[in-house]
Image: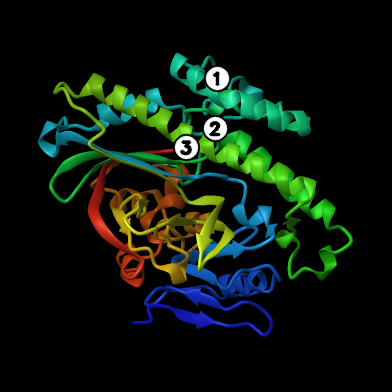
Amino acid sequence: MNHYQTLQGENGAPIKMWTQGVPVEPAARDQLLRTAQMPFIYKHLAVMPDVHLGKGSTIGSVIPTRGAIIPAAVGVDIGCGMMAVRTTLTAADLPDNLFGLRSAIEAAVPHGRTSTRSGRDKGAWGAPPETVDAAWGKLFPGFQSIVAKHPQLEKTNNRSHLGTLGTGNHFVEVCLDEAGRVWFMLHSGSRGVGNAIGNLFIELAQADMRQHIANLPHRELAYFQQGSRHFDDYVEAVGWAQEFARQNRMLMMQHVVAAARKVIVKPFSADVEAVNCHHNYVQEENHFGQQVLVTRKGAVAAHKGQLGIIPGSMGAKSFIVRGLGNEEAFCSCSHGAGRTMSRAEAKRRFSVDDQARATAHVECRKDADVIDEIPMAYKDIDAVMAAQNSLVEVVHTLRQVVCVKG
């Protein structure tokens, strides 16, 4: 059965959309049609049900290319993604009051951001712990290789951001699955250094194309051609940033588990099932018998049997899923519920009281700074999951009981 709808512009690749029963804003459609006009799109674009307007390119899109790469399509939160681990704990093992557990996690993982004018940024390490230094030691040679070509990247938040959460929709959660088992789950990416790499190469692509930029459907679609110096530099830098992001999540998870052990008296292990997946990245893959570059912008790989994570909003459920290997979608699925309104719109429309009501069942902050993450600013996660039942199957359904927001 055909589970997608096809959108076709006047001159461009087809766009296959797994969006049955979920809203798609006109601005996102227009943005997709512009991307589909690029001459190096391979076969078609695949669009996930959490699709919404993004900077550079549409969030919730899978962009397969041959011979070229669009840095703004990958974006500036390179390697952003999810990690989840199941523990041997059950709901009954958690303390009755979860505030102590939330506080312990907040103390163990730097999060948020403060202006560096007022001293040290609370979202970065002052003195990174040994676990961070050991991981940075492995990442450092690759970083040196990138800095040798692009010295402006040296003075970025790199080591001081490894093992830290960030801001916005990045979070750490304690969840319960359908059997009442406890999971830890978190969402973050390559932090300051990944942002700097993303911005630098977006600017380089636009500078390289200065002569041709007027001919592009949008300046954000500036690209590097395979064989050019910046193409190779970008592939190296983006690969490194993706590894930084993966290590960042693993370190945070170590620190979250250690923090929980200080609060929860019962001994437990936390590696029964583990998933660590990107949802903003580019990599080479084989599709329809060809080696192609696949950019997933707010999308998760869902090759046959591959586990992934699709989080809902902070008051809704999340899913551990197994890929069905749907080739038409370039073996992908959504990376979440997808926003239905901007952060500014959510802050305009909702109050702290609305936020408190929507998250009454979750131990989390309930203040003006997190209104933009209110569940009502997101699409209905059940509708999103229904629209992609040909892409993934649900393995576990999680509901959060503790949420730490950046």
The kind of residue on which mark 2 rests is Arg
The kind of residue on which mark 3 rests is Arg
- Can residue 364 be seen here? The reply is no
Q: Mark 2, mark 1: which one is toward the viewer? A: 1
The kind of residue on which mark 1 rests is Gly
Q: Does residue 152 lie above or below 316 as drawn?
A: above
Nearest to N terminus: mark 2 or mark 1 = 2
Q: Which mark is residue 113?
A: 2
Asked if the residues shown at circle 2 and circle 1 are in contact, with their CB atoms under 8 angstroms apart, the answer is no
- Which is nearer the eye, 400 or 188? 188
Residue at 41 percent of width and 32 percent of height:
250
- Can residue 405 be seen here? The reply is yes
Q: Which residue is mark 3?
A: 246
Work out how far the residue at label 2 is from the one at label 3, CA to CA, in angstroms.
21 Å
Asked if the residues shown at circle 1 and circle 3 are in contact, with their CB atoms under 8 angstroms apart, the answer is no
Q: Does residue 266 lie above or below 347 as drawn?
A: above
Q: Residue furthest bottom?
A: 10
- Tally the numbered discs: 3
Q: Position of residue 11 (x, y in %)?
A: 69, 82
Q: Residues within 10 Å of mark 1 (few under 14, many from 20)?
A: few
Q: Position of residue 387 (x, y in %)?
A: 35, 72
For the N terminus, give its image quadrant: bottom left
Helix, strand or loop at label 3? It is helix
Residue at 63 percent of width and 72 percent of height:
36
- Which is nearer the eye, 358 or 57? 57
Work out how far the residue at label 2 is from the one at label 1, CA to CA, in angstroms.
25 Å
Nearest to N terminus: mark 1 or mark 3 = 1
Helix, strand or loop at label 2? It is loop
Q: Residues within 10 Å of mark 3 (few under 14, many from 20)?
A: many
Q: Which residue is mark 1?
A: 137
Going by the image, does 380 lie left or right of 17?
left
- Which is nearer the eye, 306 or 384? 306
